[in-house]
Image (cartoon, rainbow, N blue to C red):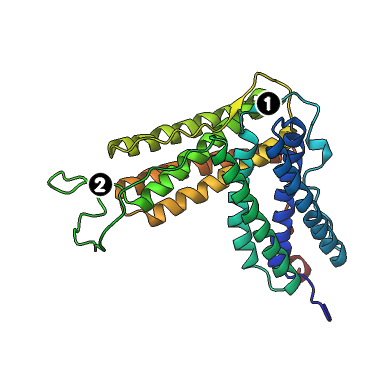
Amino acid sequence: MANKPKLCSTEIGALWMTYQKKTVILRMLEYFIAKSDDKKAKSLMEGLWKKLKPKVKKIEDLFREEGAAIPIGFSSDDVFTEAAKLYDHGFDIMFMRVLKQISMGMYTLHLSMAYREDIVTLYSELTALTQTYYNEFTQYLLTSGILPRPSYISVPESVEFITDKNYMKSSSLFGTKRTLSTIEFAYLYHSIETNITGMQMITGFAQTAHDEKVRKYFQKGKELSKEIIIETSKLLQKDDIQVPATPGGTITNSQEAPFSDKLMLYCTYLLSNFGLGGQGFGAAFSMRQDLNLKSGVFAKDVYGYAREGVDLMIANNWMEEPPHMDQHDDLLK
C-alpha cells in the first residue's frame, strides 16, 4: 500500500484486543486437539488453528512495523497438553462454538473501528473465517446429536400489530397473560445454552486451578451460571414452554490443570463480558417488563463478577495494560 498511514488509536486498540483473544483460542485449541478422540472434531479444530496462526503473526507484524511493543498475550507457558483429559462428549466443539459467537460480535465492532485498508481487510477475513467455522461447528454438533434445536412453533398466517397498552407487561389488569414472542424466547434460549457451556467450562477450571482464591472465584462463577439457568428456565416454564435440554459436554475427574490460572481467569473474564452483552441485547429487544427487570439483575451480578476477576488478575500481575492515549498534562507543568 503506497504511502500507508500509521495505525490510528482505534486500530491499535482493536488489534491489541484481538491479539489477546486469538492467543487464548490458539492455546485452548492446542489442548483440545491433543485430547480429541473424534476424527471429525479434531480435523475441524486443526483447520481452525492453521488458519488462525497466520492471523496472529500478521498482527505481530503490524505492531512491529509501527515500532510498537508486541503484546504478551498467551503462550505455550499457558497450556499443558500433557495434562489428562478434563472435558469430554463434545465439550471442545461446544465451547469453540461459543468462542466463535464472541468473535463474530467483536469483529463487527472492530471492523467499524478500522480505517486503513489492510486492517479492514484483516477483519473482513477474520469475520469470514469465524462465520465459516461457526457453521461447521454447529452442523457437527447437530449431526452428532449433541446440540438440540430450539422449539418449533406454528408459523404466523397473518400480520398483526400491537394494540394493547399492557403489551409490555407480562399480564394485563384482568390477568390475561401474554406469551413470549419468538424474539424474547430466542434471547432466553441463547442465555440458557451459553450458560450451560460456560458452567461446564468454569466447573472444570475450579476443579484444576492452583491458586485457592482463583479456585473459589471459579466456584462462585459456577453458582452464578447455575442461578441464571434456573431463573431463566422459570421464565419459560411460566409460559408453559419446555426448557431446552442442552448438554454442554461433561467433565472428567481429572485435577490436572490443562491451562494456567492466568489463561483460565482471562477466559472467564471474556465469557462474562459476552454474557453481559447478551443480557443487554435481551433487555433492549424484549417488550416484557418482567424480562427486562430480570435481565437487569443478571447484568448487575455478571458485571460485579467480571470486576472481581479483573481484581484477581491485577493482584497476580496477569492483566496486561492496553495501549493508552497520549497524556500531555505532565509536559505542560
Mark closest to the chain's N terminus, 2 or 1:
1
Residue at image coords 85%, 61%: 61
Q: Is residue 198 left or right of residue 266?
A: left
Which residue ends up furthest to the left in the rendered image?
A: 174
- Residue 270 can be seen, yes or no: no
Q: Which mark is residue 170?
A: 2
Image quadrant in which you'd find residue 311 = top right
Residue at image coords 77%, 38%: 30
* Three-letter amino acid code at the position of disc 1: Leu
Q: Is residue 230 left or right of residue 269?
A: left
**Separation (CA) of disc 2 from disc 1:** 42 Å
Bin the neighbour count of mark 2 within 10 Å (Cα to Cα): few under 14, some 14-19, many 20 and up: some
Image quadrant in which you'd find residue 176 = top left
Residue at image coords 25%, 46%: 170
Q: Position of residue 189 (x, y in %)?
A: 43, 43
Which residue ends up furthest to the top in the rendered image?
A: 253
- Residue 209 can be seen, yes or no: yes
Residue designated by label 1 = 86
Q: Position of residue 256 (x, y in %)?
A: 74, 22
Q: Is residue 271 left or right of residue 114?
A: left
Residue 55 versus residue 313 in the image, above or below? below
- Viewer-nearest of discs 2 and 1: 1
The local secondary structure at tag 2 comes to loop
The local secondary structure at tag 1 comes to loop
* Three-letter amino acid code at the position of disc 2: Ser
Q: Is residue 133 left or right of residue 175?
A: right
Image quadrant in which you'd find residue 214 = top right
Quadrant occupied by the N terminus: bottom right
Residue at image coords 62%, 42%: 269
Quadrant occupied by the C terminus: bottom right
Q: Position of residue 67 (x, y in %)?
A: 87, 64
